[in-house]
Image (spheres, rainbow, N blue to C red):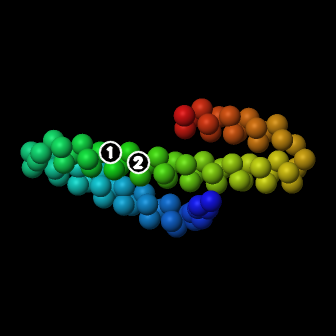
């Protein structure tokens, strides 16, 4: 089984910076009237990268909510937050 490591805040910040760079290059491609296929490939890469970052952030949010629920012996607020987070993500 392939176990992924949990991303740190620094890892996520680095990935977001790379995504921002890709978005900037997309704008440049548009301004230079480059090939649409190149742009669509770039857009697909940005979407995939954003999805990966969103999953990592959601995973951290889940872990934090579960830890708080366990330490406070009150799962209801954590479940409510989890449902809200999933609604935003999905």
Q: Quadrant of the C terminus?
A: top right
Q: Residues within 10 Å of mark 2 (few under 14, many from 20)?
A: few
Q: Residue at x 76, y 42 (%)?
A: 78
Q: Residue at x 32, y 45 (%)?
A: 44
- Measured in 3D between alpha carbons, the distance from the residue under mark 1 to the one under mark 2, in whole angstroms, is 6 Å
Q: Residue at x 87, y 43 (%)?
A: 74
The reply to whether residue 31 is visible in this rendering is no
Determine which quarter of the picture holds residue 86: top right
Residue at the left extreme, as displayed: 33
Q: Are marks 1 and 2 in contact (CB under 8 Å)?
A: yes
Which disc number belongs to residue 48? 2
Q: Residues within 10 Å of mark 1 (few under 14, many from 20)?
A: few
How many numbered discs?
Answer: 2
Determine which quarter of the picture holds residue 60: bottom right
Left or right, 53 with respect to 61, comes to left
In this view, the residue in front, 35 or 24, is 35
The reply to whether residue 56 is visible in this rendering is yes
Which disc number belongs to residue 5? none
Q: Quadrant of the N terminus?
A: bottom right
Q: Secondary structure at mark 1?
A: helix
> x%, y% of residue 33?
9, 45
> x%, y% of residue 80?
74, 35
> x%, y% of residue 34?
11, 47
Q: Residue at x 47, y 62 (%)?
A: 13
Q: Secondary structure at mark 2?
A: helix
> x%, y% of residue 55?
55, 49
Residue at the right extreme, as displayed: 73
Left or right, 4 with respect to 78, comes to left
Residue marked by disc 1: 44
């Amino acid at each position: 089984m392939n176990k992924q490591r949990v991303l740190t805040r620094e890892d996520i910040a680095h990935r977001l910076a790379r995504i921002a760079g890709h978005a900037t290059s997309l704008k440049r491609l548009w301004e230079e009237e480059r090939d649409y296929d190149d742009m669509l490939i770039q857009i697909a890469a940005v979407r995939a990268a954003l999805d990966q970052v969103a999953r990592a952030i959601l995973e951290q949010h889940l872990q934090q909510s579960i830890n708080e629920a366990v330490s406070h012996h009150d799962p209801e607020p954590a479940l409510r937050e989890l449902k809200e987070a999933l609604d935003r993500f999905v």
